[in-house]
Image (tube, coloured by chain):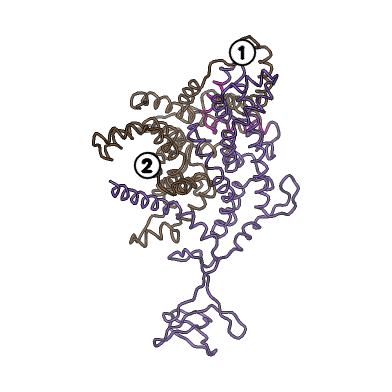
Chain colours: A purple, B brown
């Protein structure tokens, strides 16, 4: 029995490892490409470890190095020029010779081109960006700051407004409470695309397109967040509140001193959801933001793709730049995140 | 989704709390203050736009100027057919084509569900390092979809891309051109979506479902001599049917709204419209051609599709789903 369990465990590990490898291959490929010298990007067959041609210097000049194989001996030579089927080389003694191309193999050395990241970071210039505070700044710096600003405002705002409303729905009695809550629930199943066009019209009417307000305002409220928190608040026992009420605590201090501290896991869950959702949001910013200085990371990356369409090393470096903070937040917050999905059964 | 949400809400509905004496008036005022920030935003940025979408769908509106009444002409222009020669011709053939594309891309959903279930079964075994694998499988889901789209555009590059290089080294001399081929662009999108989603939300929901199955059931089955296949077939699968059903519904709903970022970043809906989904079509009509009324009508049709799907699924679900 024990032996069989061990065998199935090994089988499970093998399957997990196989899946894990398949899942990570594209991500590793992205990182590998982002560190390649441009000359190594389009090589066939592809290389996993980034390399670049090794150089030798002969008489003060740099040439690509090659490995010459002749009469069973190998020697490093400098490749001066290439002709069809032939190579012009300088051998170790500095003598120029012409040899068949099949006998010289270009030498390559492992080389991580970290400067790709700096190049991608600086590739776009923004004249005025991030609340107009930065002039002639690096594109991705501006996109980062914009994303941070918008995500911070939306996440904080949504936690505040949703928890307040959820408290009212869970703990207070008022007229039309259930009808209003039902209206909240009903909008949960309306696809975002339905509200997109009217919302855009609204923003235009209010002259808010191409402002941070357009990015932040619609995100400050959510039926989903209210629902999630209300469900959690319902599970918090009332005894503490009753005691506090006898001591003369009003609704706000019950909300702030009792419910909120007891609901940290739910708030963390919602916070993680909202952070990831806002950070990665694409369609809405794409529609309402035109000014490069106000673009967030995803639409900044989309903009970056235009002029650098085939420079894959730079595109991949930029993609890593965009993905990185999200991965960190996820790895830190994944406990809450996973619990949140299981708890609410809903995607953000 | 909504019905489930409502059911849960009802279950969570506690009997009215607090002292018995009526203090609804004061409490009402307090509640108003608590609700104000959220409800004001909800009214202006959610409820009003939802209603406005229906209103705009019966207008002609070019974003500048004000909308003019168009009756149901947008809908008949989208859905209508006209006699042409011997057969019928759709008045907006693109709509039907893009609807077909959207449904085609959903072909990956059953495969995705099966793989998610398999992953969840593996992750549910109490093995060392399971959290590492769970995190790894989930990663693609939280990565910025724009970056993922760029990454896959590179992986799918026909000449030196990773996928075709791999296929060539396996002896396939002439692998598909993927995103450049009208025939292979949609399968390429399906592969990418599978990579993004198999370890994601669906897998976590399955995992939660698995952990909710009482251990006694398995113990009893073991005493009766049931093998692992039988336990999977007769306990796990039926006990998971609510999860499967729920996951299927939300995947279909997401499927109808899918494909925007991939189309925008990778193919611009091409080649020759092969990867244009309904979402991308709505975007094109609204924000490239500024036909806001027409696009709103498309959005309303998309909403009705999603809504109808929810209703049908719910009816079917009542019959086939096994609730404990």
In this rendering, the answer to whether B143 lies above or below A194 is below
Q: Report whether B11 appears left or right of A238.
A: left
The stretch in magenta equals A181-204
The secondary structure that most of the magenta stretch takes on is helix
The residue at which mark 2 appears reads as B121
Q: Which residue carries the number 1 mark?
A: B19
Q: Residue at x 49, y 79 (%)?
A: A66
Can you tell which quarter of the image residue B17 is in? top right
Which percent across, then down, holds residue B2?
A: 48, 25
Task: Return the residue nearer the eye: B201 or A263.
Answer: A263
Q: Residue at x 60, y 40 (%)?
A: A275
Q: Is residue A60 visible?
A: yes
User: Under tag 2, what secondary structure?
Assistant: helix
Badge 1: few (under 14), some or many (20 or more) residues near its Cα, within 10 Å?
Answer: few
Q: Residue furthest top?
A: B21
Q: What chain does mark 2 sit on?
A: B
State whether residue B59 appears in this view.
Answer: no
Q: Is residue B83 above or below residue A133?
A: above
Query: Number of labelled discs?
Result: 2
Pick the front one: A248 or A43: A248
Q: Return the x and y of residue B134 as percentages of the image width and height.
A: 45, 45
């Amino acid at each position: 029995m024990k032996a069989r369990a061990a065998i199935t465990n090994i089988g499970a590990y093998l399957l997990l490892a196989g899946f894990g490898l398949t899942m990570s291959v594209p991500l590793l490929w992205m990182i590998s490409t982002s560190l390649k010298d441009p000359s190594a990007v389009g090589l066939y067959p592809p290389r996993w470890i980034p390399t670049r041609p090794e150089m030798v210097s002969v008489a003060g000049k740099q040439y690509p190095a090659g490995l010459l194989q002749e009469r069973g001996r190998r020697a490093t030579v400098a490749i001066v020029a290439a002709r069809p089927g032939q190579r012009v080389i300088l051998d170790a003694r500095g003598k120029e010779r012409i040899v068949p191309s099949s006998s010289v193999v270009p030498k390559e050395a492992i080389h991580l081109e970290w400067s790709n990241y700096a190049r991608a970071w600086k590739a776009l210039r923004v004249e005025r960006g991030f609340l107009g505070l930065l002039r002639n700044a690096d594109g991705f710096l501006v996109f980062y700051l914009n994303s941070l600003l918008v995500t911070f405002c939306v996440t904080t705002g949504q936690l505040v407004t949703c928890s307040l409303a959820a408290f009212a729905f869970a703990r207070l009695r008022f007229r039309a409470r259930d009808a209003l809550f039902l209206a909240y629930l009903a909008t949960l199943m309306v696809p975002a695309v339905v509200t997109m066009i009217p919302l855009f019209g609204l923003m235009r009417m209010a002259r808010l397109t191409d402002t941070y307000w357009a990015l932040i305002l619609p995100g400050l409220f959510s039926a989903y967040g209210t629902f999630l928190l209300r469900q959690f608040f319902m599970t918090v026992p009332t005894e503490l509140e009753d005691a506090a009420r006898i001591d003369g605590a009003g609704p706000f201090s019950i909300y702030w001193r009792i419910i909120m501290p007891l609901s940290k896991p739910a708030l963390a869950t919602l916070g993680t959801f909202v952070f990831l959702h806002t950070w990665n949001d694409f369609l809405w910013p794409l529609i309402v933001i035109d000014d490069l200085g106000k673009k967030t990371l995803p639409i900044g990356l989309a903009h970056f793709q235009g002029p650098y369409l085939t420079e894959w090393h730079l595109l991949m470096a930029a993609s890593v730049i965009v993905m990185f903070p999200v991965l960190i937040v996820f790895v830190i917050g994944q406990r809450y995140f996973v619990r949140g999905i299981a708890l609410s059964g809903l995607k953000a | 989704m909504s019905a489930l949400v409502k059911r849960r809400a009802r279950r969570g509905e506690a009997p009215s709390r607090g002292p018995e004496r009526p203090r609804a008036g004061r409490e009402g005022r307090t509640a108003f203050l608590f609700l104000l920030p959220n409800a004001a935003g909800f009214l202006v940025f959610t409820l009003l736009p939802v209603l406005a979408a229906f209103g705009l769908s019966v207008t002609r509106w070019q974003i500048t100027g004000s909308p003019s009444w168009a009756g149901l002409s947008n809908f008949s222009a989208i859905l209508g057919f006209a006699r042409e020669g011997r057969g019928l011709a759709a008045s907006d053939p693109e709509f039907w084509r893009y609807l077909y594309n959207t449904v085609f891309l959903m072909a990956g959903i059953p495969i995705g569900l099966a793989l998610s279930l398999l992953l969840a079964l593996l992750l549910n075994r109490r093995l060392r390092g399971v959290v590492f694998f769970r995190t790894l499988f989930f990663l693609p889901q939280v990565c910025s979809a724009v970056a993922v789209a760029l990454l896959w555009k590179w992986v799918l590059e026909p000449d030196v891309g990773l996928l075709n290089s791999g296929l060539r080294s396996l002896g396939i001399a002439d692998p598909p051109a993927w995103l450049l081929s009208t025939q292979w662009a949609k399968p390429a999108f399906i592969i990418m979506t599978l990579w993004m989603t198999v370890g994601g939300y669906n897998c976590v929901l399955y995992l939660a479902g698995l952990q909710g199955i009482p251990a006694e059931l398995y113990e009893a089955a073991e005493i009766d001599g049931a093998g692992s296949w039988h336990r999977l077939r007769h306990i796990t699968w039926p006990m998971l049917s609510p999860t499967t059903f729920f996951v299927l519904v939300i995947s279909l709903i997401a499927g109808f709204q899918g494909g925007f970022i991939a189309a925008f970043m990778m193919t611009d809906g091409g080649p020759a419209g092969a990867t244009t989904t309904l979402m991308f079509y709505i975007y094109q009509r609204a924000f490239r051609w500024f036909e806001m009324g027409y696009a709103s009508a498309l959005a309303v049709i998309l909403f009705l599709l999603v809504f109808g799907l929810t209703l049908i699924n719910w009816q079917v679900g009542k019959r086939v789903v096994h609730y404990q």
